[in-house]
Amino acid sequence: MVYTTLIEIDRPWNKAVDFKDKESYMEFMQTVKFGVGAFQEYSAWSLSTTDGLSVGVPYLLPNKLCYPEMVPHDYPYFYSGDVDFLLKFENMLDNPIDYDTTDIANNMLWGNRVPEWFDGWDNVFDLRAVGQTETLEEIVNFIKKKRFATKEDIINHLNWGMRIKWSSYRNALRENDSIKLTKKGYEYIGG
């Protein structure tokens, strides 16, 4: 059986799944034999791959895009092209899979990945915050006035396009004692 989130596939070998929360999704992931990445271009499905690998599910992956960065260089389940994919897919179906993804999952921990991605930085918060600028002051005043604002609200208020770098402003807001970073945006908590 092939499990997907694609309800449009109407085949006897496919079952569409829908999860109400991350916990049930992760529990289900632990029950599958292996996962498959069949991406021709970059895709956010790499997040599903990391989810599966983190709970011990080996993945058959294309040997391109972001996938070689996710697993060790000697990872046995890379494929190159359609013929190689079919051979490895059938082999994974027909034979026991004896591959421990524990090292991969441990390598995916944020604290282990950040130094690799950022040339030895201890963590992503080493990024510099923008200094005290008129724009930062305008952002803080906007959040203060609204009491809560999302990144999108702020960018629309400033009439910024896609080329403006947000990271240094986000880090400055994190350092501001009057602003609380929440899951959905920025809350003004100052007086």
Image (spheres, rainbow, N blue to C red):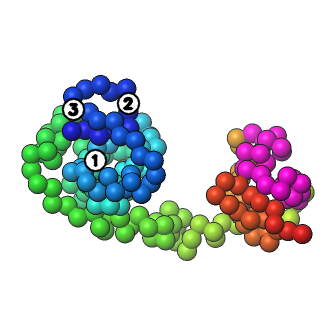
Say the numbered circle drawn on residue 7: 2
Q: Dividing the image into 4 quarters, which one contains the C terminus? A: bottom right
Res 133 seen here: yes
Task: Please tell me whether mark 1 or mark 3 is closer to you in this view.
Answer: 3
Of helix, strand and loop, which one carries label 3? loop
**Foreground: 119 or 4?**
4
Main SS, magenta region, reads: helix
State yes or no: discs 1 and 2 in contact (Cβ < 8 Å): no
x, y (%) of residue 31?
25, 54
Real-space CA distance between mark 2 and mark 3, rounded to the nearest whole angstrom = 13 Å
Q: Position of residue 152 (x, y in %)?
A: 73, 45
Tag 3 residue: 13
Of the numbered discs 1 and 3, the one sitting upstream in the chain is 3
Q: Is residue 131 visible?
A: no
Q: Amino acid at mark 2?
A: Ile
Q: CA distance from mark 1 to mark 3?
A: 15 Å
Asked which secondary structure carries label 2, the reply is: loop
Query: At which x and y percent is residue 11?
Result: 25, 26
Q: Which mark is residue 35?
A: 1
Badge 3, how many Cα within 10 Å: few under 14, some, many 20+? few
Nearer-N-terminus badge (1/2): 2
Q: Which residues are magenta?
A: 137-161
- Find numbered disc 1 in the image and state the secondary structure of the residue it sits on: strand
**Marks 2 and 3, the one that precedes in the sequence:** 2
Label 2 neighbour load within 10 Å: few <14, some 14-19, many 20+: few
